[in-house]
Amino acid sequence: MILSIQDVVKRYSSHVALDRVSLEIPKGKIFGLLGPNGAGKTSLIRIITQITAPDEGQILFDGEKLSSKHVEQIGYLPEERGLYKKMKVGEQLIYLAQLKGLSRQEAVTRLKDWFIRLDIKEWWDKQVDDLSKGMQQKTQFISTVVHEPKLLILDEPFSGFDPINANMLKDEILALKDRGTSILFSTHRMESVEELCDSIALINHSKVVLTGEKDEVRNRFKAHQFEVLFEGDLTQDLNGVDLISLEMLGNQSSKKAVFKLQEAVNPNQLLGQLIPQVQIQKFQELIPSFNDIFIQVVNETN
Amino acid sequence: MDKILLVIKREYLTRVSKKSFWIASLVAPLLLTAIYAVPIWLATRDKEVKQVAIWDGSGLFEQKDLADKEIAFQLLKGDVSQIKKTFDKQGFDAFAAIPVDILKNPQGLKIYSEKNLSLSLKNDIERMVQDKVREILLRNAGISTVKYKETQVDISSDTITVSKQGAETTSSSGGAMILAAILGFLLYLTLLLYGSQVMNGVIEEKSSRIIEVIISSIKPYQLMLGKILGVGMVGLTQFLLWIVLTVGLSTATSKLYKAPSRMATIANTSNSEELKQSVAKAESSAQPMEELNKVIESTNIPLILGSFFFYFLFGYLLYSSLFAAIGSAVESAAEAQQFTFPVMIPIILAFILAQFTMQDPDSNIAFWASIIPFTSPINMMVRLPYGVPAWEIILSMVLLVGGFLACSWLSSRIYRVGILMYGKKMTWKEISKWVFYKG
């Protein structure tokens, strides 16, 4: 485990931001931290980045109690991006890298590599003010990873990126994962959760309401529903199966039905009842999307 | 610790590499030198020689009396109304008609000119006539010109402070006042100037949102301290530049204008009473400078400089930490204005109290103003040239350091909460709550 968050409580004067939050964040994986606005994600991230301290509980970083020496092993890209506007890009990145413990020389070498790799050499002596928003985002991403942190915390990393740059960023994130970086990824955008995350945790109203590996969570939310495409007519009743919906498809001959299996009925039994009646063209289990899971869980826990 | 150094370095270099810093560093010494040098330059430069025609109805003036370096006088005979019409065509800048009864009617002098007469030319003509008339009046009264000059004495005094042990130090209260005023004003200016620079720096970090990245690398108090020290060093650098440049420039200019050999040459070659007078005038206009030199010789310079450094440093640290706290609580410079007022009040109050301190450096007001941390930097600097007992200086310094520690503790409590607060309307009540927040 790169992070082991144990019973963390954070109270503000008017409300409790984190209420006994415990999470295990595995090494070398992408961990999605999900939750609606105001759920407590930012409070948790600020405790991990040691911007604030928890009122109760503790956090272990790679097995050790989280302390200021771990600052250099964490890279943090906050949701609200920002750089010194009146500073040159190169100097600024060197400064931020030095704050993360790199020597000036080391910082220059690594940054030059990044600038060559992303083909942005000509930005080095530009003032941040003169860069477009997307360019600033790229610059800030470099500042987050240049010290090669063990743990990378990305808060809504794709906001403000155009599709091409978003793709580039995604590739960089996956490349970092391949090199063993653990990534904590906080977002609202469920499609990037499906695409990138290995595990997730959902926080609502200051509490962890759902956690697990992505596929395992999805399995947990499977409603035992199957979508069947077929030709012909269903004439007999099906045992232990409820028909949820039935619709004609555009070409008139095909139909699409959704069945929900009752307890103790398996898909083979459904198939067995269908085959004598109709010509099956497609048979698949309906897997819930994270969008559905998110909405369902948040509504249940509100 | 080395991270604080990184912050200090950044704060220092970004400010020192700005053009505005160098402009301010150059312009102030140039202005100071100009104030000092321009009167001398004006007095000694070669002016364009003005042509003035004189019609002397009294018959007291002869051509040989009318020597002046800046004005070429020429006695004309004839009809006044005729000359009035033609003097400008003859190439004269002005025409002075001296009435017949000038001795009885000193207001009777009339000066004509085509264009508006310059004030200095008018004065010069009047003085020339006045000197001659006075000379004649003195002679008529039986007083020799030499005797008269001897009566023109100029009284100036040396004030001497006698310590309890009976040791005497020559002091000059006029000069002490000037030195005190300069030091006090300098401190006042820098507290405001660099204090608000710290505040704007904090606001910049907060409004550009870089703050969250920075404080995920270093502790908020490290950032605050680094910023305060970095800006403070910019202030010290500027002082150093000001002192070196001002001393350098004014020494250079005074060498140029006040070297005795050169003065003698001017006086000799021109051989004119007028010029000697004007040089003397220039010297007397530089008299405050000499007074100042006298104080500088009579006071304990290491003490003054050391104290100035100390009071600048801790006064600045105290106020700038408060400014940093205010900067952290707001999101824009405009919003900051309403909150800076309570911090400005003690600075302005200290400056006002300094006027009283200057008038009576041993009064109760002066004592308390130079002891209480918020007003002591300015007021103690004002008092120092007059002589202050050691225990008072030590007490004042100890209290100032204590005041700084208290203020920076308070400020860092506010700062660490404030920098992460967005979109809230700040009130003093809200800010005071932050002091007691945990973690």
Image: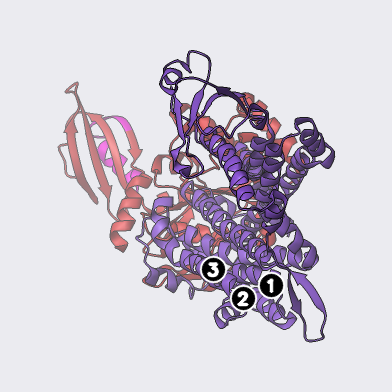
Q: Classify the position of the N terminus of chain A by image quarter.
A: bottom right
Q: Which residue is mark 2?
A: B361
Which residue in the rendered view is the most extreme toward the left?
A235
Residue under the point 19% across and 41% down: A245
Name the image colouring: by chain
Assign a secondary structure to mark 2.
loop
Chain ID, red in image: A
Q: Which sits in the foreground, A23 or A138? A: A138
Residue B82: percent from the left, percent from the top?
Answer: 43, 17
Query: Which mark sits nearer the N-terminus, 2 or 3?
Result: 3
Which residue in the rendered view is the most extreme toward the bottom?
B164
Where B98 falls versus B243 (above or below)? above
Q: Amino acid at mark 1?
A: Tyr
Q: Classify the position of the C terminus of chain A by image quarter.
A: bottom left
Q: Which sits in the foreground, A28 or B435? A: B435
Residue A149: percent from the left, percent from the top?
Answer: 66, 48
Residue under the point 60% across and 73% down: B376
Q: Which residue is mark 3?
A: B355
How much space separates mark 1 and mark 3, taking CA atoms? 14 Å
User: What range of the chain is rendered magenta?
Assistant: A266-282
- The colour with which the image depicts chain B is purple
Residue A195: percent from the left, percent from the top?
Answer: 47, 39
The tag on residue B386 is: 1
